C-alpha cells in the first residue's frame, strides 16, 4: 500500500482550523478555506495542457445538463487526442470534464502530496493513515448538474472558479445504502437511483473548501463556468470495507443477504481473506490481472 508521506513544500495553502476527522467513513462534512485561486497549475491554459499530457483514460466527460438522479450514470472516457479542446471549450460545448489522477504529472504530484501533508499535519494523523493520495480537476459549463452519487474516498473539495452548490444527503434506508456501495465496489460508478434524504446544500465560492466523507450522497450544481480541485485519499479502514462490499455483492447475486461492513468484525475479516484469496486465484489465470 502506498502511503502519502511527502512533506508539504513551501507555503501552506489550506486553512483547516482543527478538523475533527476519523479514518473510517463516519466523519461529518466540514468547511475550510484555501488560497489556490489563481495557482499557475490550475488555470485553464495549464489544465488544457494537462489534459493532453494525461492518458485518454484519465479524461472523462458528460453532458453538463442532467437530472439530479440518473440511475446508472457513468461519464464517457475520452477517445483519441485533443482533450485540451474539451477543457478550453467546456462552456461552449456544454460539458462536465473530469481530469483524473492528475498526480501522474510530477508538478501535480507535488501539489497533491503537499496538500495531503498539510491536512495530515492539521488533523494530527499518524503515518499510514492516509493512503493512495490522488487529485482530480473538474471543469464544468454553467448551469450544470452532476447526478447524486457516492465516491470511494475521503475528499477535500476546493472551489477555484465560479460558484458551486454542493448538495449532500443520506440514504433513505440501509438496504439502498448497501446496494449502492456494493455496486460501486463491483465496477459501477456509484450513482444512486433515488434522491437522498436530509439534503444540505453548501454554496462554495472561489477560495472555499468542503470535506466530503465517503458515506455522503452528493450532487453538484453550478451557476456559471466552474473549475474545482478534489484531493482524495483512502485509509486501511476504507480498504477493508471495500473488500467486504465487493464480497457482499457476490453473495447477493447468490440470493443471500450479507451483513454490511462493521456489523461483525469476525465476519468482515473472513470476507477480507476471501477477497484476497480470490485476487490471488485471478492472478494465476492467463489474461487476468
Image (cartoon, rainbow, N blue to C red):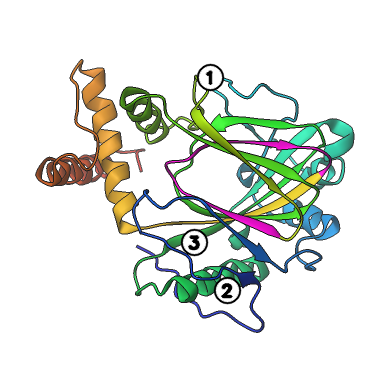
Marks 3 and 1, how far apart in space?
28 Å
Instruction: Name the N-terminal-most of marks 3 and 2.
Output: 2
Measured from the top left, where is residue 66 in percent x and y?
70, 23
In the figure, 279 relative to 158: above or below? above
Q: Is residue 126 left or right of residue 197?
A: left
Measured from the top left, where is residue 42 in percent x and y?
76, 61
Q: Is residue 86 visible?
A: yes
Give the farthest residue toward the left: 266
Q: Residue at x 51, y 28 (%)?
A: 191
Marks 1 and 2, how far apart in space?
36 Å
Circle on res. 114: 2
Q: Nearer the viewer, residue 201 or 50?
A: 201
Q: Secondary structure at mark 2?
A: helix
Whether 221 is among the magenta residues is yes
Asked if marks 3 and 2 touch (Cβ < 8 Å), the reply is no
Name which quarter of the figure residue 218 lies in: top right
In which quadrant of the rendered image does the N terminus lie? bottom left
Give the farthest residue toward the bottom: 10
Q: Is residue 285 visible?
A: no
Measured from the top left, where is residue 116 in percent x and y?
52, 68
In the figure, 247 relative to 210: above or below? above
Badge 3 crowding class, 10 Å Cα cut-off, few under 14, some 14 to 19, many 20 or more, is many
Q: Is residue 6 left or right of residue 165?
A: left
Q: Secondary structure at mark 1?
A: loop
User: Mark 3 = which residue?
Assistant: 133
User: Mark 1 = which residue?
Assistant: 71
In this picture, which residue range is highlighted in magenta? 208-225
In the figure, 200 relative to 116: above or below? above
Q: Secondary structure at mark 3?
A: strand
Measured from the top left, where is residue 117 in percent x and y?
51, 74
Amino acid at each position: 500500500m502506498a502511503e502519502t508521506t511527502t512533506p508539504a513544500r513551501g507555503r501552506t495553502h489550506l486553512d483547516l482550523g482543527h478538523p475533527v476527522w476519523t479514518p473510517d467513513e463516519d466523519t461529518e462534512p466540514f468547511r475550510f478555506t484555501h488560497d489556490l485561486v489563481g495557482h499557475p497549475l490550475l488555470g485553464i491554459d495549464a489544465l488544457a495542457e494537462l489534459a493532453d499530457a494525461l492518458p485518454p483514460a484519465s479524461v472523462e466527460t458528460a453532458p453538463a445538463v442532467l437530472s439530479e438522479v440518473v440511475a446508472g450514470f457513468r461519464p464517457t472516457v475520452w477517445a483519441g487526442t485533443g482533450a485540451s479542446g474539451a477543457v478550453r471549450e467546456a462552456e461552449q460545448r456544454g460539458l462536465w470534464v473530469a481530469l483524473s489522477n492528475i498526480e501522474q504529472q510530477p508538478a501535480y504530484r507535488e501539489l497533491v502530496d503537499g496538500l495531503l501533508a498539510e491536512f495530515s499535519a492539521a488533523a494530527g494523523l499518524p503515518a499510514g493513515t492516509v493512503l493512495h493520495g490522488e487529485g482530480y480537476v473538474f471543469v464544468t459549463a454553467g448551469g450544470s448538474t452532476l447526478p447524486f452519487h457516492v465516491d470511494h474516498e475521503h475528499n477535500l473539495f476546493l472551489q477555484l472558479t465560479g460558484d458551486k452548490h454542493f448538495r449532500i444527503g443520506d440514504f433513505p434506508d440501509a438496504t439502498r445504502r448497501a446496494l449502492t456501495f456494493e455496486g460501486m465496489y463491483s465496477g459501477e460508478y456509484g450513482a444512486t437511483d433515488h434522491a437522498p434524504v436530509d439534503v444540505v446544500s453548501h454554496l462554495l465560492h472561489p477560495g472555499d473548501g468542503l470535506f466530503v466523507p465517503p458515506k455522503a450522497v452528493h450532487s453538484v450544481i453550478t451557476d456559471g463556468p466552474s473549475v474545482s480541485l478534489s484531493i482524495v485519499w483512502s485509509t486501511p479502514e476504507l480498504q477493508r470495507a471495500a473488500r467486504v462490499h465487493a464480497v457482499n455483492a457476490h453473495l447477493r447475486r447468490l440470493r443471500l443477504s450479507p451483513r454490511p461492513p462493521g456489523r461483525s468484525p469476525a465476519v468482515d475479516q473472513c470476507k477480507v481473506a476471501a477477497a484476497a484469496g480470490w485476487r490471488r486465484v485471478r492472478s494465476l489465470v492467463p489474461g487476468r490481472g
